[in-house]
Structures are given as structure tokens and as C-alpha cells.
Image (cartoon, helix red, strand yellow):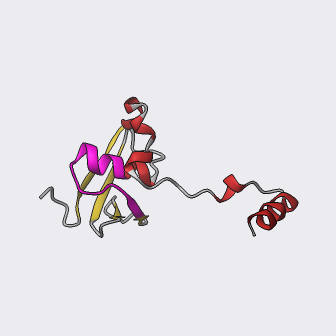
């Protein structure tokens, strides 16, 4: 089956990497190899969000399974693999602020 799928992809001119999923675990974040990249709110993957939630803010969120659309209040909601929901507030030239679903830190 894998050979048939690979052959079909070749025929269609697609590579397997075209279907690669976005990294979602904190352990997969680029910040693990270069922490200097952690000073931005731009281009964050689910893995980067999990990394910030865990390492910057101490939330129990080793993996982000979903990322919502931005709200009118300037944040979006992420859902962690354990079911925890967090608010993410992107900030210019800084890492995002991440709070609990109510907007607090407890």
C-alpha cells in the first residue's frame, strides 16, 4: 500500500513532505536548539506555543492539539493534549503572553 501511495505521489508530482503535519509538541520546537528564536510572536507553530506555555509560563501543556482563530479582543485560544484551554496574546517583538482561559495566571 505504501509503495502504491508513494508512486501516486510521484505521478502527481507531490512529495511526502507536502503532507507533513505542523509540529505540535514542545519537544519539537525550534526553541530547543536555539532559544534566541523565542523572542517573537510571529510564525509560531503549535510546538512553539506548547514550548512557551510550558517553559515560559509553567502551564501543563506539552502538546497543542488545536489553535483557534484570533478574537476581536486580540487573543486566540489553544487547546492542549490534556484538554487545558489557554489564551494566547501575540505581542510585537516579544514572546506571546499566555494565560488561562479566564485571562489569569492561576
Q: Residue at x 29, y 51 (%)?
A: 53
Residue 60 vs 31, above or below: the answer is: below
Q: Residue at x 87, y 61 (%)?
A: 11
List the single residue furthest toward the left: 106
Residue 40 vs 61, above or below: the answer is: above
Q: Is residue 22 left or right of residue 42?
A: right
Pinpoint residue 88: horizontal percent, then vertical percent.
Answer: 32, 56
Q: Residue at x 29, y 57 (%)?
A: 61
Residue 53 vs 85, above or below: the answer is: above
Image quadrant containing the N terminus: bottom right
Pinpoint residue 106: horizontal percent, then vertical percent.
Answer: 12, 58
Residue 101: which quarter of the image?
A: bottom left
Q: Is residue 105 left or right of residue 39?
A: left
90 vs 7, nearest the viewer = 7
| Number of numbered tags placed on the structure image | 0
Question: Is-magenta flag for residue 3?
Answer: no
Pinpoint residue 5: horizontal percent, then vertical percent.
Answer: 77, 66
17 vs 41, nearest the viewer = 17
Question: Is-magenta flag for residue 60?
Answer: yes
**Residue range highlighted in magenta:** 50-65
81 vs 92, nearest the viewer = 81
Q: Is residue 49 left or right of residue 99?
A: right
Q: Is residue 35 left or right of residue 87?
A: right
Residue 2: which quarter of the image?
A: bottom right
Pinpoint residue 26: horizontal percent, then vertical percent.
Answer: 38, 49
Q: Residue at x 39, y 37 (%)?
A: 32
Amino acid at each position: 500500500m505504501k509503495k502504491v501511495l508513494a508512486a501516486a505521489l510521484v505521478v502527481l508530482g507531490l512529495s511526502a513532505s507536502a503532507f507533513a503535519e505542523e509540529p505540535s509538541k514542545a519537544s519539537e520546537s525550534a526553541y530547543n536548539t536555539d532559544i534566541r528564536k523565542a523572542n517573537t510572536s510571529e510564525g509560531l507553530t503549535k510546538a512553539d506555543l506548547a514550548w512557551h506555555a510550558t517553559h515560559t509560563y509553567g502551564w501543563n501543556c506539552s502538546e497543542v492539539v488545536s489553535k483557534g482563530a484570533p478574537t476581536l479582543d486580540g487573543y486566540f485560544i489553544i487547546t492542549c493534549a490534556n484538554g487545558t484551554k489557554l489564551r494566547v496574546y501575540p505581542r510585537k517583538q516579544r514572546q506571546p503572553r499566555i494565560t488561562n482561559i479566564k485571562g489569569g495566571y492561576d
